[in-house]
Amino acid sequence: MSDTETVPTEEPTEVMEDHEETEHENGTTCLYTNDDEIRTVFSDPVNFNVKHPLFNSWTLWFDNPGKKANTASWSQNLKELITFDSVEEFWGVYNNVVKASELSAGSNYHLFKRGIKPMWEDPANEQGGKWVIQFPRNKTGDDINNLWLYAMLACIGESFEYADEVCGAVVSVRKIFYRISLWTRTSNKEICESLGYFFSHPLHLFTFASVRYQMKQTLNLNPNQQLEFQPHSDSIKSGSHSKERLVV
């Protein structure tokens, strides 16, 4: 080899990260690397169309049955608004529906896992119950929007220790009060106390144990504010009044 000859160099090869791209009907995509790591919107800053999937799909329902509604007419008034399964879709829904504070008296929003109807009789609900808390309407005002948002985020974010036991959440607008409730799949005391405590935290009530602990954490309740657990079985037997209830 002469002094002037040079050894040919290899062309650099471009290393491409293996990923799987899934396209949805609405044109958005979910990107996964070869080890199933979810890619964020920063992976595609130009199109900005990567979705962040939720663990479960959720359905938002609405009803305003009126004062004389019976079970049959209530179910007819129950409207399924939309089902979503990603963070982006949730915010799209939340930012484009009427806020809870602007609903007429008698109205309810129900956010439930897909496939579960917001009714006592649904198989997922019939053995469970609900944690309930009320707020004076004249003192709560627009704060109910934040409280309802906290409740929804806790549900779709699977924030509870017993997240599998959570069926959904409801905000009810009445003439003199607002009511938020967390529906559970079970009436087990230990599980329900845990859920209730955590649920109340973002509303700001503090007591002992796990559902109760988590419900209070979620709603940032006043330390003196009470939540009450109402088993659906009691409500079915005696109308809207249950005989024995957990209070936290």
Image (tube, rainbow, N blue to C red):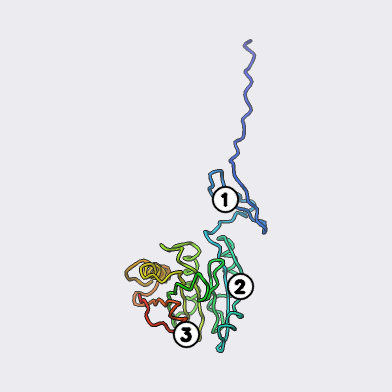
Q: Which residue is mark 1?
A: 42
Residue 21 visible from this viewpoint: yes
Mark 3 or mark 1, whichever is nearer to me:
3
- Tell me the amino acid under the disc marked 3: Gly
Give the camera-side residue of 244 and 7.
244
Residue 200 visible from this viewpoint: no
Give the camera-side residue of 166 and 128.
128
- Tell me the amino acid under the disc marked 1: Phe
Q: Residues within 10 Å of mark 3 (few under 14, many from 20)?
A: few
Q: Is residue 248 left or right of residue 159?
A: left
Q: Position of residue 141 (x, y in %)?
A: 48, 80
Judged from this view, the residue extending furthest toward the bottom is: 68
For the point 47% across and 62% down, which residue is it?
158
Q: Position of residue 5 (x, y in %)?
A: 64, 14
Q: Which residue is mark 2?
A: 80
Q: Which residue is mark 3?
A: 239
Judged from this view, the residue extending furthest toward the top is: 2
Q: Residues within 10 Å of mark 1 (few under 14, many from 20)?
A: few
For the point 55% across and 81% down, which residue is it?
107
Mark 3 secondary-structure assignment: loop
Quadrant in which residue 208 is drawn:
bottom left
Mark 2 or mark 3, whichever is nearer to me:
3
- Tell me the amino acid under the disc marked 2: Glu
- Counting labels gives 3
Quadrant where the N terminus sits is top right
Quadrant where the C terminus sits is bottom left
Q: Position of residue 12 (x, y in %)?
A: 61, 30
Q: Position of residue 150 (x, y in %)?
A: 47, 68
Q: Is residue 122 left or right of residue 12?
A: left
Q: CA distance from mark 2 to mark 1?
A: 33 Å
